[in-house]
Structures are given as C-alpha cells and as structure tokens.
Amino acid sequence: MTNTIQQSFTPSPEEVAQFHERGYLGPFKVYEEEEMKRLWRRERLRLMDRTGAVYDEGDAQAGNTNIANYDRHLDSTFLADHICKPEIVDRVTAVLGPNVLCWRSEFFPKYPGDEGTDWHQADTFAFASGKPQILWPESEKEFGGTITVWTAFTEASEDTACLQFIPGTHRTMFYDETKNMHYQPDKINAQDKDGVNRGFYGYDYRQLQKDPNWRPPEERAVSMIMRPGEAILFWSTMMHASKPHTSPEKGMRLGFAGRYVPTSVAIYPDTDDVDEYGGKVSLKDYGAVLVSGVDTYTHNRKVTATTRGHVFPVR
C-alpha cells in the first residue's frame, strides 16, 4: 500500500514573525490563474441555484443587503473545498494553532463605478447589529478578531478596487463596536483626504471612531495587487479598505473571504439570527466548519457536510 504524503504549505518562522509584525501574509497562490478563471466561469452559474443555501433568499436580499453573500460554502461543493484547501489552512493554523473553525464566508464584488470601501477594523463583528458575532475567551483576551483569507477570483488591481492595508494597526482598536451605526444605503459618502470616494455597504464606519477627530494614517497604506487565484491572509483588526473600481472595461472585481477562529472562540453567542445591512436571517441551519484538528468544546454549533451532502475535508 502506498502512503500519500500531504504537501505542506506552512509558512516559515520568518514569514510568521513578519505576519505578527504587519498583520498580514501574502499574497500567495491558491490556484493557477487560468484554473481560477475556468473554475469561476463554471461556479458563478452553479451558485445561482440557491436551493441548498442556508439563508432564505427573500430575507437575505431584503433591503438589497449584503447577507445574501454569506456562507455559500455551506451549500457549494467548490466553496466547501476552497475554505479547507491546504494552501489556506496550513497558513491559518501557523497563526491560530492546530484546532480551527471557519465560521463565515463572504463574497465581495465591486462593479465598475463602485466607490471604495471605507477604512475599518472588526473585532467582535458587532458593529452592525450591536450583538457580538465572535467572542474570544477571557483567558485569551489579548486576542480578538478573526483571520480572514481573501482570495481574488478575478483581477484585483489599483483600478479594479484592490484591497488596501495599513500595516501594524492590528494591535490597537480605533473603533468602538458597541456604538450604533445607522444603515443608510443611499447615503453619499465623503471623499478621503486623497479624494477617494469610500463607503461601507450602507454604513458610515466613522460613526464608530473612539476619537471623532482621529483619521486613519493613509500615508502608510499599501495596495494588495492580486492576480486571479491569489490570496492574502490578515487580521480583521488591521485597518483595511479597498479602492474604487474605475475601470469599466475590466468588469466586476470579485473577492471571496473565509473567516477563521480557534475552536475556543464562541461563535454567534446568545443569538439566533443575523440582523444587519437592512436584512435579517435565521441561523437555524447554520454551522461552523472544523477545517483542522479537533474541537473539544461544546459551545459552537457545527456541521460536517454541506446541505448537499459533500463532506468537508478536515486537514
């Protein structure tokens, strides 16, 4: 019998140290560029079928909300395998440890003419509804947020709304997520100091600033230019944003984000729904996915297969 040796994508100690200093790692390749283009041509059609989606389409799209993009890995075989890919999981476990859950995934489309995404940080993800969506245990209270792995399904360039990071800002929260943001989908947002139009999916993230007079140090910003199939790993507590999409000839820019936490983190504690972006969805069919190791805790609801029966490949 031949033993199959798994390829390792664990970053070097130097890369991990650089991640802790900057707050991000990458970009790195998950798919070959032509492979990504081929896969997305196929999957964008399959994803139009929402019969297996865990959130009701009518509720998810109420108010033109972004919740419709949440957690399609729970019904899509391709996305289920994507969040578990060794190229991703090995890098995540190098930061979070061996026992890891994927608790959410999201699509982030930007169409030609769309404004940039405002500078923001996320710790408990309570900024929209006021309810924490993830809580680290008291014994690990120096940590917070989630590891996000953002994969470019299409080109992400300076003119197609690439991500921007402010390195080293992941250790200090400049926003108070317990403050209330008002959902105003038709609000026209102000320009930043460089004249870039930015917003936050119907919210004004500046309403959460601890110091109303504080401004993000945009002079330190770096752009994450990525080819289709490349990914970037970063702390959600690091200041991040995106540029506007100013290139009509290049079509939609699409990123797909998987969000990861250790199994010790409580996911959606004391809540049965997600209420944000002008919509509300029930969590009755939701479950986190173990992507690596074991889960000895009992505080999170979990699933081991998609709604269509595809088993998640645990690393």
Image (spheres, grey):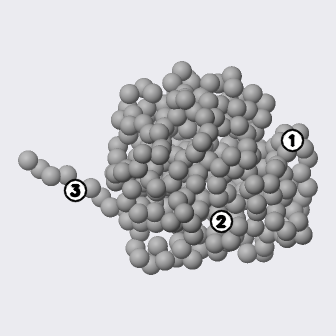
Percent x, y of residue 226: 59, 58
Which sits in the foreground, 231 or 36?
Answer: 231
Quadrant in the picture for residue 92: bottom left
Label number found at residue 5: 3
Whichever of callouts 3 and 2 sits on the residue coming sooner in the sequence is 3
Point 74% across, 56% down: residue: 177
Amino acid at circle 2: Met
Which sits in the foreground, 46 or 180?
Answer: 180
Say what secondary structure mark 1 lies in. loop
Q: Distance from label 1 to label 2 (Cα)? A: 25 Å
Amino acid at circle 1: Gln
Q: Distance from label 3 to label 2 (Cα)? A: 35 Å
Question: Is any part of residue 84 visible from this angle?
Answer: no
Point 44% across, 78% down: residue: 14
Percent x, y of residue 145: 60, 59
Say what secondary structure mark 3 lies in. loop
Amino acid at circle 3: Ile
Residue 268 against residue 225 in the figure, above or below? above
Point 52% across, 59% down: residue: 137
Which sits in the foreground, 302 or 13?
Answer: 302
> In the displayed structure, does residue 60 sit left or right of residue 214?
left
Q: Distance from label 1 to label 3 (Cα)? A: 52 Å
Q: Nearer the viewer, mark 3 or mark 2?
A: 2
Q: What residue is pinned by disc 1?
A: 184
Asked if labels 3 and 1 touch by Cβ distance under 8 angstroms, the answer is no
Q: What residue is pinned by disc 2?
A: 238
Point 51% across, 54% down: residue: 265
Looking at this rendering, what residue extends furthest in the left direction? 1
Q: How crowded is the residue under tag 2: few (<14 C-alpha within 10 Å), some, or many (20+)? A: many
Q: How crowded is the residue under tag 1: few (<14 C-alpha within 10 Å), some, or many (20+)? A: some
Whichever of callouts 1 and 3 sits on the residue coming sooner in the sequence is 3
